[in-house]
Every structure is written in C-alpha cells, then in structure tokens.
Image (cartoon, rainbow, N blue to C red):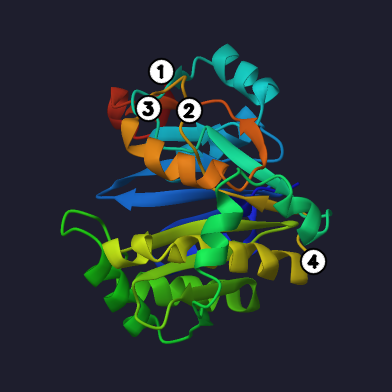
Amino acid sequence: MTDIRQTPEYAQYLSKIGWKIENESEVFSFIKPFLTSSVLKIPRPEKLEVKVVQQIAQKYKSVQIIVEPKDEIQEKILKENKFKTAREISSITKTLHMDLTKSLNSISEEFAKDTPNYLKKAADLKVYSVNNIEKFRQSWKESVPLFRHVPSTNSLSFLQESFGKKIIFLVTPDGSSGAIFLKGDESVHYWQAFSSRKGREDYAQYKILWSGISWAKNIGAKIFDFEGIYDERYPNKSWLGFTHFKKSFGGEEVYFPPSYTKILLPNLVGLNKSYVLL
C-alpha cells in the first residue's frame, strides 16, 4: 500500500507551500530550498535507490538528506550507506491500522469497553462536513491553547485544493471539536484534530472520529490509519493522552523505523561547488 506521503495529492500540496518536487523511479522526493542550498526529504518510498537519492541531492545542492524508511529492508540499506538515525524523531514511527474491509458492526465490537458508552452520550451531537476553511480554522484556533500550532488558512486551503474529493473537514455546530481526514491510495488518515474543553466534555471527538471512519468505509478505503500513537522506543509523553483515545477504537499496532539522515558538505577544492556525501 502506497504511503499517503507518496501520493500525487500530497506532492501537489507540498508544492503549493514552497517545496520543489522530484518524481524519479516512481518515488516522490521533496526539496526545501534554503538560501543557495536545500534540504532533501524522502518519506516512506515504495523503493529506495541510494544512487538516485544522491543524484537529486547533488542537483539541488542539498546540505542534508532525510529519509523515512518504510521497512527494515530500507533501514538496512540506509545503514549500509552511512546514514545515521536522526537525533530528533519527527516522523511517525508507530500507528494503528483499522481494517475497513470489516463491517462497521464488526469494527465496533473491537472498541474498548467505554467507547460505546461515550458514543451513546454523543449520539445527538451533530457533525457537519464544511468547506469554509477560514471558519474551520477560527474554530480550531479558539479551541486550543495559544502555544498550540494551528495551520494557516492558506495551508489548509492548499490541502483542500490538492486532495479535492479525497478530503473531508468535520466539525461540531459550535466549533468545539473538528478533524481533517485524508484519503491516500487505499487508506484514510486521521490527519489532524482539535477539541476544546467543552468538546471533550461532550465526547465530541468520539463522534467525529466515528464519523470519519464511516466516511472512510463509504468511499472504499481498506485501511484507516490513526496517524501516530505513543512509541515506547522513542518516549514522548505528549502522545500519551491522544494515544489512549485512539486505542479505544481498536486497530492493529504498526511499527516503522525512525528517520535517517546524512549531512552533506560542499567540496570547495578548486572552487568546485559539487556536493559530496559524508
């Protein structure tokens, strides 16, 4: 199954927010320009060809390559080519996958014991699909603390434009809770979400997530990806609360290797500006 970060829609979105795109050997590479150089990022490629990666890095004078391997085979290739584990693990290394080939009734039977009760409490709560990005963002901004990052209106609009019918913005009438769901190849992803204290008291995110799962099944997705849970290999306590919520819906735990990186330096001998791999 192709990772959502290797889809044309995701590539189009990154292009709109300032990244350059290369599509070599059916793999998207993303280049972030930085002064006269760049950073090269390759998330979860279907196949990994280090020679192609090096060629792209040289073309864009990249000072750093970041690769997010999709499996242990790719991780082994990176280690053999002197890539190092990234100091800061920014990629999702553990998630939950829900099997959407099952009926919704079968899926609900795998819920944690309290989840059906919370959904029952939120049964009368309306959830709407909205297209007004500015209003959606304002609700998001008003629902979370000031230190929480909220994407810009432009960024959310570009996401909507890029994914078209493969995206849905769900929100409660009072704007106390909302979420974005994206469809990839055969999967739907619980991309981003927000909830205020009132939303949590109303169990609104339970209703929104279940609505997103139902939407995913209706549009023919086979897997629902919860887009990250707490990974005991790389402890980050900020993931614990949201992980408890996500795991209450069931699903199978899936692990990924961490990000790998390589620093590149310019070879200035004889004023040759080509970049060499460390």
Q: Earlier in the sequence, mark 4 or mark 1?
A: 4
Give the residue at x 44% y 62%.
203
- As drawn, 178 above or below 57: below
Secondary structure type for disc 4? loop
Q: CA distance from mark 2 to mark 3?
A: 30 Å
The percent position of residue 18, horizontal first and vertical second, equals 38, 63
Q: CA distance from mark 4 to mark 3?
A: 43 Å
- How many residues crowd mark 3 within 10 Å: few (<14), some (14–19), many (20+)? some
N-term mark: 4 or 3: 4
Label 2 secondary element: loop
| Identity, as a three-letter code, of the amino acid under mark 1 | Leu
Amino acid on which the number 4 mark rests in the picture: Gly
Q: Are marks 3 and 1 in contact (CB under 8 Å)?
A: yes
Image quadrant where residue 237 sits: top left
Determine whether 120 is above or below 31 in the image.
Answer: below
Which residue is at the front of the view, 46 or 72?
A: 72
Q: Earlier in the sequence, mark 2 or mark 1?
A: 2
Disc 3 to disc 1, C-alpha distance:
6 Å
In 3D space, how far apart are the residues under numbered discs 2 and 1 (Cα atoms)?
30 Å
Circle on res. 278? 1
Indicate the amino acid at tag 3: Leu
Is residue 12 something that shows in the picture?
Answer: no
Which x, y percent locates residue 145? 19, 58
Give the spatial CA distance, label 2 vs label 4: 29 Å
Q: 10 Å neighbourhood of mark 1: few (<14), some, or many (≥20)?
A: few
Q: Which residue is mark 3?
A: 264
